[in-house]
Image: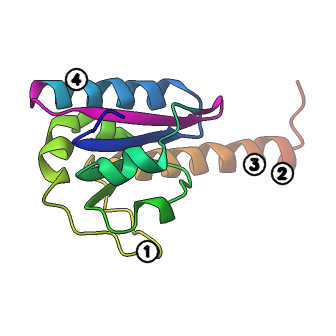
Amino acid sequence: MEAYDIVAVAACDKGVAHTYMAAEALEKAAAAAGKKIRVETRSSGGEKKVLTDEEIAGAGAVIVASDMDVPMERFIGKPLVYTGISDGINRAAELIGEAHRAPVYNGGTVEMPPAKSGGARVALPIVIIGGALAAAAYYFFAVLDFHF
């Protein structure tokens, strides 16, 4: 059995692209840091390269970059970095650096850290504009009985 410095899970239920982008980014960042890593992938396409109990037991740390539920009980007793899939893609080198300093996972639910991308600043105007367009459409089609 090969020993790994880090085992990881990259998971996204919206498709497969983000899952594999995160897995590749983590693998490249680990190689650049001189660390051995093994990445399990989970997506709408299923589970691939599922980590074995032996691989997890032999690893020094765990990274879970996921936007979907991942079975976490298998990581009890390991330093664990838990974050979103976008961090697995965009912050892979930082995650590799944080892994061995992470708090030990003792079970229970894991809280997702706050997003660092500022997505709320972008989403709010989209929601406001979308709402205004929906209101205008309602006015023209329902109130004014507009027909094509």
Instruction: Give the Cα distance between marks 2 and 3.
Output: 5 Å
Coordinates of residue 30 in the picture (x, y in percent)? 19, 31
The foreground one among 25 and 2 is 2
Q: Which residue in the structure is indicated by mark 1?
A: 107
Disc 1 residue type?
Answer: Gly
Instruction: Give the Cα distance between marks 4 and 1.
Output: 29 Å
Helix, strand or loop at label 4? It is helix
Instruction: Give the Cα distance between marks 1 and 3.
Output: 52 Å
Q: What is the crowding at mark 2: few (fewer than 14 residues within 10 Å), some, or many (at least 20)?
A: few
Instruction: Give the Cα distance between marks 1 and 2.
Output: 55 Å
The foreground one among 128 and 97 is 97
Coordinates of residue 147 in the picture (x, y in percent)? 90, 30
Q: What is the crowding at mark 3: few (fewer than 14 residues within 10 Å), some, or many (at least 20)?
A: few
Q: Residue at x 43, y 74 (%)?
A: 107
Q: Which residue in the structure is indicated by mark 4?
A: 28
Coordinates of residue 90 in the picture (x, y in percent)? 25, 34
The foreground one among 146 and 83 is 83
Helix, strand or loop at label 1? It is loop
In the rendered image, the quadrant that contains the C terminus is: top right
Instruction: Give the Cα distance between marks 4 and 3.
Output: 53 Å
Q: Mark 4 or mark 3: which is in front?
A: 4
Disc 3 residue type?
Answer: Tyr
Magenta-colored stretch includes residue 38: yes
